Image: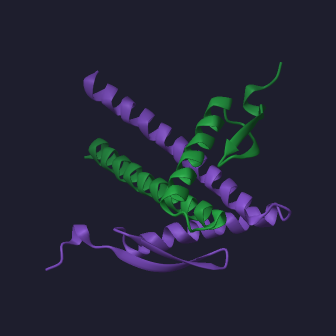
Chain colours: A green, B purple
Amino acid sequence: MQNEAEKTNKVKVEINNEEYIIKGPETVEHIQLVASYVDEKIKQLSKAHPNLNTYRIAVLTALNITNEMLKLKQEYEEFLSLVDGEVKG
Amino acid sequence: MQNEAEKTNKVKVEINNEEYIIKGPETVEHIQLVASYVDEKIKQLSKAHPNLNTYRIAVLTALNITNEMLKLKQEYEEFLSLVDGEVKG
């Protein structure tokens, strides 16, 4: 029987009208969610900045998502330290 | 006196050897942190996939960071619901 933990999924997704094959241990649904998130963000930025080339649009998309991720990480860490304080206090 | 909440910072950053001007309400340090994170991830992927064009590298970078962000979000939400359960239970 295949070990679920070692399973690799391979999913064909479309981002900004181009195909990508994504491989990973994540579920097919998760990979599709990730892809549709990036697809949507790239299309939004392309619309807002029609004069920027696609490479710079993709870099700006990565910057925006990183900003979101790092803020979430900070919020999570602050929350964890608060909870930790409550338990110890 | 300037309202801190309305302050917009404008920071020149370098990502994969190209300059970008990033504007936002975040601190200069945070914007630099975001930029260096993306810069590092793009350079790592370029090294690992020298035959891919820079646009696809940037899209794959955005996908990887989104994957990380969505997993963190799920973990945070699960933790919040656990804490909520503790309080109610």
Please state the horizontal and vertical placement of residue B66, each as a whole percent of the image. 57, 49
Indicate whether B61 appears above or below B22: above
Asked if residue A83 lies left or right of residue A63, the reply is left
The residue located at (40%, 49%) in the rendering is A76
Compared with residue A54, is residue B67 higher up or lower down, i.e. above or below? above
Q: How many marks?
A: 0
The residue closer to the viewer here, B51 or A57, is A57
On screen, residue B21 above or below A66? below
Closest to the observer, B61 or B55:
B55
- Residue with the most extreme left position: B1
Q: For this view, does A36 lie left or right of residue A76? A: right
Q: Residue furthest top?
A: A1
Residue B13 position (above or below residue B37): below
The one of A27 and A85 positioned closer to us in this rendering: A27
- Rendered location of residue B30, percent (x, y): 43, 69
Q: Residue furthest right?
A: B51
Residue at the front extreme?
A50
- In which quadrant will I find the N terminus of chain A? top right
Q: Position of residue B55 (x, y in %)?
A: 71, 62
Tell me what residue is drawn at x 38 percent, y 30 percent: B82
Q: Is residue B11 left or right of residue B51?
A: left
Give percent across and percent down for residue A4.
Answer: 74, 26
At x 65%, y 37%, the residue is: A31
